[in-house]
């Protein structure tokens, strides 16, 4: 039998198109339990590679013959070898090119909506990490919000669309992934914006992102209005785009709310988080569509692969927005924190410009799921 090679892009389409897939993950159990490829109709078998060195006969009855089987490992090598063994045993299988390393890096651009006067809004979904980035396009110009470090994805997409990147924003100083924002700005001569309250230690130049800032994109005059919304960080800032969309950064997610502890100041910032969620956001129109900077679980994806929900629906459905007692809210947010992101302190240092790790080091820093939320 032939061993097929699948790219992360091909697997991403199976997630978005809600297709079935059986994954044989040959990483160690702890790595699999911590982080795996997720899809609405994915099934899994986790058998560490070292348990298959003497052959695959024992696992053949556990593998389906009526659906596609994909072998996955950390970087590719082990999955190729296991896939070849299964092929020799008469099974049709594929392996993931680049392993979980490539899955963590892949971005799928999805159109969220047309905007008034001919503009477009795109969401870049990083399925393997739960990161969400955005590009607003209008009349030959573009703005990017919360770009991850794979800068070529954004610059190449802008070229495909025939637009010039004019503005690049980070809603806050990220701690779970490395930002590509200032590098995109440097490469395109765009203006790079960062909240000044998050930028007290940065070692590069930036334009302050402050409440009330109104940036026009293109001749169609799409407004990108800044709304100060602290809590995840002290400088966290949201955007209202075209009076239709609320980009919440890491303050509010579809199924959860932001965590306030990644700078070691949970007790200090939990009050800011509640003020943002229960006061500032409550003053906004409920018809605004929330577009967060992350998602945690696959169920947060819509049928088209986007992550988006009406603000009014979240006020009804999101548990983090329905804790009336302030003491209980404080306890929920500070006592139920998940493990902190991998290498988050070093990632903050990278995003401040204080350290410049190479590409392999950056990849290692980001390995694993996103952990920006409290559920």
Image (cartoon, rainbow, N blue to C red):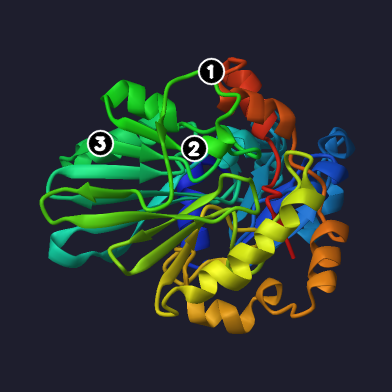
In the rendered image, residue 154, in percent from the top left (x then y), is placed at 35, 37
Q: Which mark is residue 165?
A: 3
Q: In this image, 3 relative to 45: left or right?
A: left
In the rendered image, residue 114, in percent from the top left (x then y), is placed at 23, 65
Q: CA distance from mark 1 to mark 3?
A: 23 Å
Label 1 crowd bin: few (<14), some (14–19), many (20+), radius 10 Å: few
Residue 298 visible to an observer of this rendering: no
Q: CA distance from mark 3 to mark 2?
A: 15 Å
Judged by depth in the image, the label closer to the viewer, 1 or 3, is: 1
Residue 44 visible to an observer of this rendering: yes
Label 3 crowd bin: few (<14), some (14–19), many (20+), radius 10 Å: many
In the rendered image, residue 333, in percent from the top left (x then y), is placed at 79, 61
- Which sits in the foreground, 123 or 323? 323
- Residue plotted at (74% across, 65% down): 375
- Residue plotted at (49% across, 46% down): 171
Q: In this image, 116 relative to 343: left or right?
A: left
- Which sits in the foreground, 128 or 271? 271
Name the quadrant containing residue 270.
Answer: bottom right
Judged by depth in the image, the label closer to the viewer, 3 or 2, is: 3
- Residue plotted at (70% across, 38% down): 73
Q: Which residue is mark 2?
A: 148
Q: Which residue is mark 1?
A: 203
User: Circle 3 sits in a helix, a strand or a loop, which is it?
Assistant: strand
Q: In this image, 3 relative to 115: left or right?
A: right
Q: CA distance from mark 1 to mark 2?
A: 19 Å
- Above or below, 193 against 287 in this view is above
User: Circle 2 sits in a helix, a strand or a loop, which is it?
Assistant: loop
Q: In the current view of this chain or complex, which residue is farthest to the bottom?
A: 316
User: Circle 1 sits in a helix, a strand or a loop, which is it?
Assistant: loop
In the rendered image, residue 299, in percent from the top left (x then y), is placed at 61, 69
- Above or below, 19 against 45 in this view is below
- Residue plotted at (79% across, 40% down): 264
């Amino acid at each position: 039998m032939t061993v097929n090679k699948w790219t992360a892009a091909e697997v991403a389409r199976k997630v978005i198109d809600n297709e079935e897939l059986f994954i044989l993950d040959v990483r160690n159990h702890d790595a699999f339990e911590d982080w795996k490829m997720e899809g609405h109709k994915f099934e899994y078998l986790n058998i560490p590679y070292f348990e298959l060195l003497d052959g695959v006969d024992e696992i053949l009855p556990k593998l389906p013959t009526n659906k596609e089987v994909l072998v996955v490992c950390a970087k590719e090598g082990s999955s190729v070898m296991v896939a070849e063994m299964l092929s020799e045993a008469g099974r049709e299988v594929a392996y993931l090119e680049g392993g979980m390393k490539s899955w963590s890096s892949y971005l799928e651009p999805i159109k969220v909506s047309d905007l008034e006067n001919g503009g477009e809004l795109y969401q870049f979904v990083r399925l393997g990490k739960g990161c969400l980035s955005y590009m607003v396009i209008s009349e030959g110009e573009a703005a990017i919000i919360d770009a991850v470090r794979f800068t070529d994805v954004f610059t190449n997409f802008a070229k495909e669309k025939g637009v010039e990147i004019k503005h690049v924003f980070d809603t806050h100083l990220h701690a779970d992934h490395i930002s590509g924002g200032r590098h995109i700005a440097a490469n395109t001569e765009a203006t790079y914006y960062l909240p000044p309250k998050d930028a007290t230690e940065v070692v590069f130049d930036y334009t302050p992102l402050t409440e009330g800032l109104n940036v026009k994109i293109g001749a169609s005059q799409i407004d990108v209005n800044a709304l100060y919304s602290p809590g995840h960080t002290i400088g966290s800032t949201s955007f209202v785009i075209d009076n239709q969309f609320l980009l919440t950064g890491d303050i509010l997610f579809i199924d959860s709310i932001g965590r306030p502890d990644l700078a070691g100041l949970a007790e200090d910032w939990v009050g800011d988080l509640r003020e943002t969620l229960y006061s500032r956001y409550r003053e906004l129109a409920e018809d605004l569509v929330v577009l967060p900077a992350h998602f945690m679980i696959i169920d947060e994806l819509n049928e088209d692969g986007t992550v988006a929900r009406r603000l009014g629906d979240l006020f009804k459905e999101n548990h983090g927005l329905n804790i009336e007692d302030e003491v209980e809210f404080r306890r929920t947010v500070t006592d139920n924190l998940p493990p902190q992101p991998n290498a988050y302190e070093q990632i903050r240092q990278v995003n401040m410009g204080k350290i410049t790790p190479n590409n392999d080091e950056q990849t290692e820093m980001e390995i694993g799921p996103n952990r920006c939320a409290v559920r």
